[in-house]
Amino acid sequence: MLEHGGKLTQAARRYGIAVENWLDLSTGINPHGWPVPALPNEVWRRLPEDNDGLLDAARACYGASHLLAVSGSQAAIQVLPTLRADCLVGMLHPTYSEHAHAWAKQHRVAALNAAGIETTLDELDVLLLCNPNNPSGERFAPDTLLTWRQELAARGGWLVVDEAFIDAEPQLSIARHTGAEGLIVLRSLGKFFGLAGARVGFVAAWPALLAQMQEALGPWAINGPARAIARLALQDSVWQQHTRERLQGDSARLAALLTRHGLAPAGGSSLFQWIRTDRAAGLHEVLARQGILTRLFDAPASLRFGLPGAEGEWNRLEIALGKLA
Ligand SMILES: Cc1ncc(COP(=O)(O)O)c(C=O)c1O
């Protein structure tokens, strides 16, 4: 199992600080997630059905015609590599580590940097990018991605774009261009909507690939309550618009706060900021001893900060950063 943010009970044990006293900035989950209502009893009692409106809501929200709902984009990340014969897959390093972990089980994985993609593309069978990238925040323009998709698809290759952190910047998304062979887009309700615990995500791709994935995942891949909540959240365009503005403001505020304390971000998204520093391990430790959990990366040495929520949390972070110097 790989390291991930959000392991609060582990941190509580290690530092002797009760779970409820932590400020958890170790994930990129929106601290002001979509407000989940109580659900009708039959949602719990009945088996989930495909025609419950979830896919229509996702199609309208993402502008994609062909979608499969999955139990978090993690489910798709694990299945995708099983749908190709041995091949060469290029992806950035660092990026969300589950991708390399899943592909390396039966394929060759090449670590790329963003500047090297263009020159390496003709050697690759699959190019996999997170847009924006987690944790480095690199972004890829839709036109560039669509050109790469065309080159790959012409020889049976795939472009896989993980858009888990794109919801606050919908103009970057290429979900609406899916449907033809060679382009696979992953979306998640875990980050922007703050519904990571519900485990809902989507794959947008061409129908034959979605049918293969559905076959691999089997029936009732998402539970009924999660489907009901996801549908309502995807239909709530007023909340989404408000949240885009809020997250962009909060992300800029976090970048400014870190910069004021000598930790200027090397990159980020609407939901996190990424700091590259040789002091990463030491800073992580000092903050953790004050009950503030960040996400530490070894290579390259770096720290990722998620967004504080309530004003008291911003103050707490500011005070802790002030003691770092
Ligand atoms: C870039 C990226 N993609 C996908 C995921 C998986 O998200 P989920 O399975 O909750 O949809 C994560 C989780 O951290 C992520 O950072």
Image (cartoon, rainbow, N blue to C red):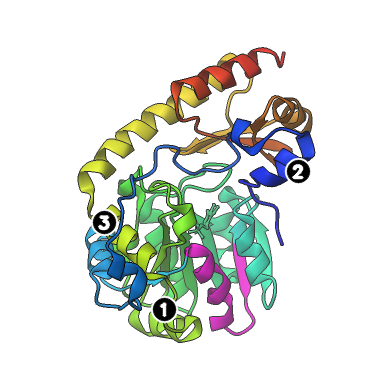
Check disc 1 and give the amino acid type.
Answer: Trp
Check disc 3 and give the amino acid type.
Answer: Leu
Sequence-wise first label, 2 or 3? 3
Check disc 2 and give the amino acid type.
Answer: Asp
- In the image, residue 151 sits, relative to residue 20, either above or below, namely below
Q: Residue 272's spot in the image, x, y percent?
A: 52, 37
Spatial CA span between label 1 and label 2: 38 Å
Q: Which residues are magenta?
A: 72-90
Element at badge 1?
loop
Q: Check disc 1 and report the residue beneath it.
A: 220
Circles 1 and 2, Cβ within 8 Å, touching? The answer is no
* Crowding near the residue tagged with mark 3, few <14, some 14–19, many ≥20 C-alpha atoms within 10 Å: some
Q: Residue 267's spot in the image, x, y percent?
A: 54, 35
Sequence-wise first label, 3 or 1? 1
Work out which quarter of the rendered image holds the C terminus and state it. Answer: top right
* Crowding near the residue tagged with mark 1, few <14, some 14–19, many ≥20 C-alpha atoms within 10 Å: few
